[in-house]
Image (cartoon, rainbow, N blue to C red):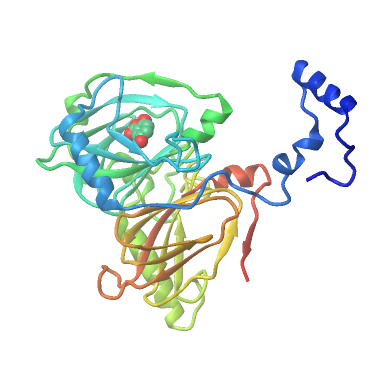
Amino acid sequence: MKAPDQPDVTPALEELYRGFEQELLVPLWTEIGDLMPTHPRSRAVPHLWKWENLIKLADQAGHIVPVGRGGERRAIALANPALGGRPFATPTLWAAIQYLMPGENAPEHRHSQHAFRFVVEGEGVWTVVGGDPVPMQRGDFLPQAGWNWHAHHNSTSKPMAWIDGLDIPFQYATEAQFFEYGRDEISDAERITPERSRSERLWGHTGLRPVSVKSTAPGSPLLNYKWAFTDAALADQLALEAEGYAGTVEQGHAAVRYTDPATGRDVLPTIRTEVHRIASGVETTPVKETGSSVYQVFDGSGVITVGDKSWTVSRGDLFVVPSWVPFSAKSEAGSGSDSGALDLFRFSDSPVLEALHLHRIETVK
Ligand code: GTQ
Ligand code: FE2
């Protein structure tokens, strides 16, 4: 339909548009609705990936596709159905399941992309970050800021899976990425399995930062945020609420954000990471927020609503919340989970949006 201030289609107008085309020019007036919408309209759509399907395909890949130099990682990415088949969960975020067979090594490399790993099941893999071996267990969150050397190794007799989150699509858009290969094999000294990484021994004590050490790199110097601490923080918030003290996001909804112990800021420059615990029977208030998120169900079950989509979810399932699309979660966990609640791991591009003053959040009435 023609806007009120637009001219009729005449031979002169058609001639003008042909001239624009020839000179590779595009007028604002035909594009403004798409380029400058009144509110965000994400190209991405809400979508759910079931863990049982992902893990089955990852295991098949483990038996058929080797991991080594070139491909680097046996990582299989979520591709949002509205993003042209690209391995992009959202316009800014990469989310993948990574799978290592017994005894396998994923070779060392480093890249400008910021990354993390989150473990929904299994144990026995460790990731060597800058020569520091970091063991991984269920519920552990391992941030790894850009340009750190890293390699993974499975020392057990069982395959192991975890999820990776990276800002690959965001950095792809910036055209500012760098990548470098490291050693093909890590040293024997890095192949040991300590109970705690050096980073945890130095930075993993609540409220206590080492006086002698400066954290100079971008992102958190703490390489593993163990589940026991996350679980205790969430349990305490709900317990405090039950005792009549505040502390929760809203009634029956506890949440923690992973932060850099040196600065108190997000653990990664481009990615925010949180865990939300929703008590059984509780439904969260629908919220819309600029920027996009990926969630993984860590424990429990429930019903997730994102815009006009609604899914029943359980442990390991992953879903996407595009920019400015209302999100709410209803916990129906009951006795199925460790805590009797629905635990959701979330990552988003919020630090980027905040840095650029583009972050907005609203509850939906
Ligand atoms: O484990 O180093 O899912 O470099 C994508 C890129 C994982 C990794 C991914 C990576 C990695
Ligand atoms: Fe990597």
Query: How many numbered circles does the render carry?
Result: 0
The quadrant holding residue 14 is top right
Of all residues, the one furthest to the top in this rendering is 22
- Viewer-nearest residue: 22 or 105: 22
Residue 263 place in picture, x, y as percent? 52, 46
- The residue at 25%/70% (across/down) is 336
Where is residue 106 shown, x and y percent of the image?
25, 29
List the single residue furthest toward the front: 11
Q: Going by the image, does 204 lie left or right of 152? A: right
Residue 76, percent from left and from top? 32, 37
Residue that appears at 43% across and 81% down? 242
| Residue 340 in view (yes/no) | yes
- Which one is nearer the viewer's eye here, 34 or 255? 34
Q: Which image quadrant for residue 337? A: bottom left
Q: Tell me which residue sits at (39%, 44%) in the image.
A: 222
From where the camera sits, is residue 216 visible? no
Tell me where residue 89 sits by quadrant: top left
Compared with 75, 251 (above or below) is below
- Quarter holding the C terminus is bottom right
Q: Is residue 264 left or right of residue 234?
A: right
Image side of residue 77 versus residue 162, left or right: right
